[in-house]
Image: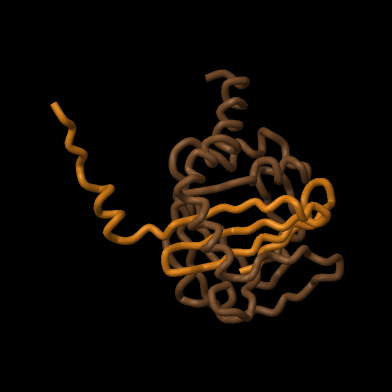
Amino acid sequence: MLISFTAPDGRQVLATQIYRPEGYVTLLSIDGAPQMKPIRVWTRVSKSDERRKQRPALFPI
Amino acid sequence: MNHLDSRRALQLVGFGAASMEALTVSVAAQEFAQAGAGPQPPSAGQKSISSAPPSAIVNGTYEQTYQEGYAPALLSVGFSEDALFKMFPTGPQQMTITTTPTTLALQTKGLEELIFLGVLKSTQVFGIEVKDWLARFEDRPGC
């Protein structure tokens, strides 16, 4: 998926999102700043992960 | 926590904490990213709004697990530090994405935003008005 917008300083920003079964990565590309390679990783939350988080925590004595 | 402490926290989260994880996550993230083509700098005349049907692989709930370089990049294009605090809240960030051939719904913390794919949208990005926000699927598997 591609997301683009104009930043407050007028430069174009393009976000490329690459999807995989385990999650997706967002790579930012800023017009005029090829040296910057911001990256953000989102991991898919599986149903089992959600169930695990909902279980009450056991605290050691 | 006072405001200066908050700014210090942002620096740690935005610049330091991510690099702490980088030893174990960065290689995998880079391989993950390189599996698809990297982003191309947008050209001034880029106005393609063609959309392909989104893959079912997109739909789901996600949690942010790694980031690198976002804060300095966004600061460099005019977003304020205060705006960035909205991007790096304390605690894990989760988002649910639901797509149809023409729409993209983003849901986080009970709030949902519906976006029409391939249509310019006026919205707020980190609290700043953006008038030409555009999302579209590329005709390529996985994007």
Task: Give the percent coordinates (x, y) of residue A61.
Answer: 13, 26
B80 vs A50: above or below: above
Task: Specify the quadrant that holds the N terminus of chain A.
Answer: bottom right
Give the colour of chain B.
Answer: brown
Q: Is residue B138 left or right of residue A32?
A: left
Q: Residue at x 68, y 53 (%)?
A: A37
| Front-lying residue, B101 or A39 | A39
Circle count: 0
Task: Give the percent coordinates (x, y) of residue A23.
Answer: 46, 62
Q: Residue at x 52, y 59 (%)?
A: B106
B136 vs B14: above or below: below
The chain that appears orange in the image is: A
Q: Is residue B22 left or right of residue A10?
A: left
Task: Give the percent coordinates (x, y) of residue B120.
Answer: 73, 66
Task: Give the percent coordinates (x, y) of residue B70.
Answer: 64, 46
Q: Residue at x 49, y 56 (%)?
A: A42
